[in-house]
Structure formats: C-alpha cells, structure tokens
Image (tube, coloured by chain):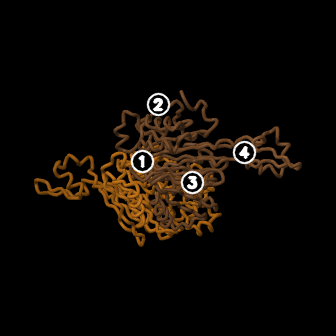
Chain colours: A brown, B orange
Amino acid sequence: MRFEVIPLGTGAALPAQGRSPSAQVVRREESLYLVDCGEGTQERLRMAGLNFMRIGHVFISHLHGDHYFGLMGLLSTMHLLGRTRELHVHGPPALKPIIDMQLQASATWLRYPLHVHPLVDDAPHEVLVDPHLTVTSLPLRHRLPTTGFLFRERPGPRRLRAERIADIPHYLRTAVKNGDDLLREDGTVIPNAELTFDPLPPRAYAYCSDTAHHPQLVDWVRAVDLLYHEATFTRHLAARARETMHSTAAEAAVIARDAGVGALLLGHFSSRYKDPTPLLMEALEVFPRVALSEEGRSYPIGRSIVDNSFGP
Amino acid sequence: MRFEVIPLGTGAALPAQGRSPSAQVVRREESLYLVDCGEGTQERLRMAGLNFMRIGHVFISHLHGDHYFGLMGLLSTMHLLGRTRELHVHGPPALKPIIDMQLQASATWLRYPLHVHPLVDDAPHEVLVDPHLTVTSLPLRHRLPTTGFLFRERPGPRRLRAERIADIPHYLRTAVKNGDDLLREDGTVIPNAELTFDPLPPRAYAYCSDTAHHPQLVDWVRAVDLLYHEATFTRHLAARARETMHSTAAEAAVIARDAGVGALLLGHFSSRYKDPTPLLMEALEVFPRVALSEEGRSYPIGRSIVDNSFGP
C-alpha cells in the first residue's frame, strides 16, 4: 500500500533560492490529499506528474499567502478541465469568503461541488474519515490561527496465514479477516489467532507548519512514522524565530525526539539559506533520522522509511 | 529613449503548453508598468531580470483569474522585500475588496502605501498622467467588465538644430525648446522654426485583452506603433470565439489593419494550440506586420519596430 508525501514547495514566505512556497501532496494508493497550496502549486503538481483531478481534499494550514495563494488558480483549472467530482477544502474560517468573493467577481459557477469546511484551532479535531485515512487538525502556535494535520491510516483487516488459507472456505474469509473464529462443519472451532496475523500497524504522518516551538505537539504526534516540521531558521536566529513565531531546526528536532517519531522531514526554509545544510546539521545534533525536504521527491511514510534519505 | 513591452504570459485561461497566464511589462526608460498579473508573474518577472520594485503602476484588465491571481503574491513579496515606495493598482471596482479581504485575513499591514483605483468601463478614460506617459483605459467586450490600456508618450520638447545651437544663449535654450522665438540683443527675432526641429512623434502602445471582435477599438488605437491584441482562436473556431467573447487571429488583424497600426503582437493563445503558428498565418493574410508574442522577449514600441520580428 503506497503511502508517501511529496513536498512541492520548501521555501518560506519570500520566494527565493529556487524554492517554492508551501505545498505538498500526501498520496495513499491512488488518492491524493493536498496540504497547503502556495502560488504556482498547480504548475508544480504538473511537473511532478501528479494528476490533480485525483485530489479529493485540500487542507490549508493558515492564511499567510505563501500557504494558499495558489488555491484559486487550482480551483479554476479543475473547473476548466471539466472536473465534476466534488472537492473538499478545509481551512481557517476566513477562507470561504475569500474564495466566494473571487468566484463571484469572475462570475464563475464551478462545474463541480466545492465544499469549504472551517477548521477550529482550539484543540485537535478529526476533520476527515474516509475509507483509508483519518485526518486530524492540530492547533499550532503562529501569528494567525494555524493548524497542522495528522494523517493516520485506518486499521486494516487481520492478515490470513498463508499456510492456513486452504482451511478457510472462501465465503468465510472476510469474517476471519475481521477477527471471527472459524466454526467448522464438524462443530469444532479454530481460534482466529491460529489463522491470522495482526493487521499491519496503521502508519501516520504529521504536517506541522507554520509554528513556533510547541511542546504540546509531542503528545499529538507521538510515534508517527514521519513528521514534517517547519525549520525556518537555525538557532543563531532563535530570537527572530520567536519574534515571527517560527521554529529553529533544533526545536523541530526536539519535537521529533521527544515524540519518538520514525523520521523527521524539515522544510519552510528561510530565503536567507541558499544551502539549507546548516539546518540539517543542527537537527542531527538532536535527532538522528532527519532529511531536508526536496521539492518533487517522494518520501515514504512508514515501514520503508529508514533508508538513505534519513540519518547521518 | 527605451520604450518596449515584454510579454510574460501568452496563454489563455487554462495553463498548458508551457505558456503562462497573462502578464506583461511596459518599460519606458527605467520605469516599469505591469499589465495584468496571472499566477506566477512574480517568478517570471524575476526570470526576465526585471526589478519589480521599479513597478509604480499595475493595470488589471478584468477579474478572470488568469489575469490577476498573481497579484496578491506580488504585493506580498514587495512588502517582504521592504518596499516603501507607493504602488498604484488600477482594476475593476471589485478588485479592491478582494485585496483588502486577503490582507485582512493575513493581518498584513503593508509597509508601502497601496492605492487601488477603480476603472470605469463605459468609455475611454485617462487613468494615469505621469511625466513620461499617459495611460488611457479602453472598454473591451468580454464576459466581465474589461478594459484595455493605451500607453502614449507625452510630447517631448522641440529639438535644437545642431548648427544653430551656438546662436542660442544657454539660459534661453529651454524656452526655445518649448517653442519660443529667439529675441536677440540687437532687437531682431529669429523664428523658432529656424532653430528647432519638431519633437519626436510620441509613440503609443495598446493592450487589448480579453475581447470579442470590437470594431470600435479602431478609432481608439488608430496609428499606434504597436498593438497587442488577443488571438485566442483561429477562424475555424469563430463560433467558440463568439460564445466565449474572444477574438480570432483574423479579427485581431482586421483591427490592426483598419487602425493602421505600426505592428501587431498576438497573444492569449488557447491551450489547444501547441504551436501557435496557424494563428500567425491567419493574421498575416489580413495584415503584414504581425508577430506571435514570446514570453520574456522584448518588443520595441515605435521607430525601430519594423525589424525581423514582424512580417513575413
């Protein structure tokens, strides 16, 4: 089951150094979820070969322009390409009137149903449950109401033991996968545990941008397989980070370490870092499995994660 | 005196074929004027090596997204780069609340004065007179209130005849350039015409996008040195052009021919034309001095215009 994240923009507010503003795609099999949508996201989706008609949900963390100025263009292009499937956008309450006013100004009646859901940032809230994933909003600490997003697979079925499959009639396999014991025709019972393995552990990914250092996150992202955390500055600019309510790379790594995550992906690099390697080096002092996010690259979430991408 | 236009986006509403949405820069010496501002314009300004802090005025033709979705990002970047010089944006009346709502949502207080001027589309109106140019809005015929823009140099001074300069005391030269006769110390008068040539003729450029075929334009753009006119479709799609209130390449050329312009620049090509050459060929049947606009290329306005860029 493919489950991965593809960063499309790794820059901070000021576009520079060839980096784009925030956007990333979470892919779970053929379903795409878009997280943030800075200017030019539609173009970068195309460059990454991602069919954005497969996006069913868009999550906007907050209303600084580098996180959403590409949204109207994407909505408009989906319309022009003849989308009919409904689209859900989750964002701060002020997002809906911004979308509505611009649709009205262009006299555009979208061909597809668009549902804009307001996010509440007082506590974590489950904002989506679909057949594959749950998505939970996480309050972040920033200059505007801001939420991160936690993507967690829904538990899968128990897995049949290959050597026992022949013992289970076809019509009972779904029941056994769901945990039932097997009642045989002779009246004997085979306990489920003899027939199956536990389900694969659900994998989880958390997106935390933008935020000041926020220790409460530790409980919310505990043991996720992959944590994306903003790292706008190095610790030499800790004062600037506090002033602008961003994090240093060391602070991001502290969250990763304390939460015991599988791996940490850094992003939202300030334009002052032509080469973001100092951010990586700083995080590695605190936590071993770190990577700098690269635009257009795929990062697996979960079991295959500890590869060459992460760690020293 | 440099006077040129640099198209930054030559595509229509649907981004495709590597073409960007509408935007162009009119440059007159060191002053930049931005006309339309589709998504990604700030990036293409940078790619073209244009210092967009030199932009004093932005003109938005209408509120279809492919003509203005890059504006908020540009305003925001100017702010982040520390701009303090005032900026003027001219656009449809509905533009100001769209800008205000988004600035408010991000709690952004721009560091520079931003003046948003509503355009009226009932008739041509002079919307800017600066030391170098006048800019006049031209009502176009489109699905939304839409205006084109006519840039015309202000008349320059009369030019002193080189062989007579020595006859004119320094302190009287400005007066002579302004048309005064020369009163000599002995009481005789030298008529101005013996001392000067006429000023260079003011050059003019007109931007007409988006619009259905609009013969009234002929009077308004008569004899301009360069006319940019949209050419979304070939005549095979004339019905589609009428339905969407766009022009065919032949219709654009008819306006150019009837107005007796110096040269015609085509743009706003539908995404269906991977190669826009058929649009050029169609226009050339009607009018000889035509070019397809290319993104990032400079097109001189006026005397030097009949070069290899134009004509068969």
Q: CA distance from mark 2 to mark 1?
A: 22 Å
Tell whether B147 sits left or right of A128.
Answer: left
Q: Chain of mark 3?
A: B
Q: Please check whether the numbered discs 3 and 2 fall on a single chain.
A: no
Q: CA distance from mark 4 to mark 3?
A: 46 Å
Q: Chain of mark 1?
A: A
Pointer 4 or 2: first along the chain: 4
Looking at the image, which residue is at 39% across and 34% down? A235
Foreground pick, B128 / B111:
B111
User: Quick one: label 3, few (<14), some, or many (20+) residues within 10 Å?
Assistant: many
Q: Amino acid at mark 2?
A: Val
Marks 3, 1: nearer the viewer: 1
Q: Secondary structure at mark 4?
A: loop
- Callout 3 touching callout 1 (CB < 8 Å): no
Tell whether B177 sits left or right of A114.
Answer: left
Q: Please check whether the numbered discs 4 and 2 fall on a single chain.
A: yes
Q: CA distance from mark 4 to mark 1?
A: 39 Å
Q: Which residue is mark 4?
A: A158
Foreground pick, A20 / B3:
A20
User: Quick one: label 4, few (<14), some, or many (20+) residues within 10 Å?
Assistant: many
Pointer 4 or 1: first along the chain: 1
- Callout 3 touching callout 2 (CB < 8 Å): no
Q: Which residue is mark 3?
A: B15
Foreground pick, B31 / B169:
B31
Q: Quadrant of residue A274?
A: top left
* Residue furthest out toward the left: B186
Q: Is residue B299 visible?
A: no
Q: Which residue is mark 2?
A: A286
Q: Amino acid at mark 1?
A: Arg
Pointer 2 or 1: first along the chain: 1
Looking at the image, which residue is at 83% across and 49% down? A183
